[in-house]
Image: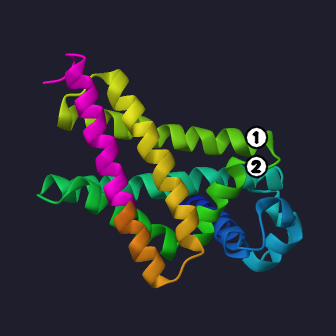
């Protein structure tokens, strides 16, 4: 029994240390710094561990970077899933989604900056990882659109792709704006997304592919 508890405690401590490393790396990212500019030693110092301990959790700084990208994308996707649950209770899909997205990126600017920067960064592995996260967004939104509008998959996918790219672009703009500019941007994006949604429905109906 004592041995089992010891193993469990070691595993818990290992998970805590891994979490500390991830949180430390996120905290080092800001408007001036990207993944490529932070070092393993900096991350270890911020996490309160010895540099050698880092290698018990990640092979190198690149593996940590890929983990950060995965976590950033997952955190945002989970939040948008929660938004869709609120929509199901009677909220406006576009209003709720945009407000939720904007609240997230402004409260977690380092997380969102990571996705923005690495999407066009110098690392092929990081670019591919961010693209996978964006594709996850598109797939989930495509499925949601088909379920709620009965659009055929081709139109729903094109609509989702346009919406995701527009919202990500708006998020980048929001990071550099003041509160008033951010609110104005959010309202503008809501209108633009309605244009896209209405355009997709009109085009599908004209082609005889939507109810």
Q: Is residue 195 left or right of residue 42?
A: left
Separation (CA) of disc 2 from disc 1: 10 Å
Q: Is residue 144 left or right of residue 21?
A: left
Residue 178: within the magenta? no
What element does badge 2 sit on? helix
Along the line of sight, the residue nearer the viewer: 13 or 203: 203
Graded by Cα atoms within 10 Å as few (under 14), some (14 to 19) or many (20 or more), the crowding at tag 2 reads few
Q: Residue at x 41, y 31 (%)?
A: 158
Graded by Cα atoms within 10 Å as few (under 14), some (14 to 19) or many (20 or more), the crowding at tag 1 reads some
Q: Which residues are magenta?
A: 189-211
Q: Which mark is residue 1?
A: none
In the displayed orientation, state which residue is furthest to the top.
208
> x, y (%) of residue 160?
39, 38
Q: Give the image quarter of residue 64.
A: bottom right
Residue 10 in view in this figure: no
> x, y (%) of residue 56?
78, 57
Q: Give the image quarter of residue 172.
A: bottom right
Q: Residue at x 29, y 49 (%)?
A: 194
Q: Which mark is residue 63?
A: 2
Q: Is residue 92 left or right of residue 78?
A: left
Mark 2–mark 1 CB contact (< 8 Å):
no
Q: Residue at x 70, y 73 (%)?
A: 24
> x, y (%) of residue 76?
46, 57
* Mark in the foreground, 2 or 1: 1
Q: Which quadrant of the figure contains the C terminus?
A: top left
Q: Main secondary structure of the magenta part?
A: helix
User: To which residue does mark 1 refer?
Assistant: 125
Residue 195: within the magenta? yes
> x, y (%) of residue 96?
27, 62
Colour treatment of the image? rainbow
Along the line of sight, the residue nearer the viewer: 139 or 208: 208
Q: Residue at x 84, y 52 (%)?
A: 60
């Amino acid at each position: 029994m004592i041995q089992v508890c010891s193993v469990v405690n070691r595993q818990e401590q290992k998970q805590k240390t891994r979490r500390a490393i991830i949180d430390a790396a996120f905290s080092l990212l800001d408007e001036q710094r990207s993944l490529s500019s932070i070092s393993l030693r900096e991350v270890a110092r911020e996490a309160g561990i010895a540099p050698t301990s880092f290698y018990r959790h990640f092979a190198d700084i690149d593996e940590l970077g890929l983990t950060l990208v995965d976590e950033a994308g997952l955190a945002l996707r989970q939040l948008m899933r929660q938004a869709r649950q609120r929509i199901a209770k009677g909220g406006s899909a576009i209003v709720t989604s945009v407000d939720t997205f904007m609240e997230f990126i402004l409260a977690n600017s380092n997380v969102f900056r990571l996705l923005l920067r690495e999407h066009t960064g110098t690392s092929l592995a990081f670019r591919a990882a961010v693209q996978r996260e964006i594709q996850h967004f598109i797939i989930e939104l495509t499925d949601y659109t088909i379920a709620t509008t009965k659009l055929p998959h081709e139109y729903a996918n094109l609509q989702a792709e346009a919406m995701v790219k527009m919202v990500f672009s708006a998020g980048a703009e929001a990071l550099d704006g003041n509160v008033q500019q951010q609110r104005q941007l959010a309202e503008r994006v809501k209108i633009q997304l309605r244009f896209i949604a209405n355009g997709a429905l009109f085009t599908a109906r004209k082609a005889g592919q939507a109810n």
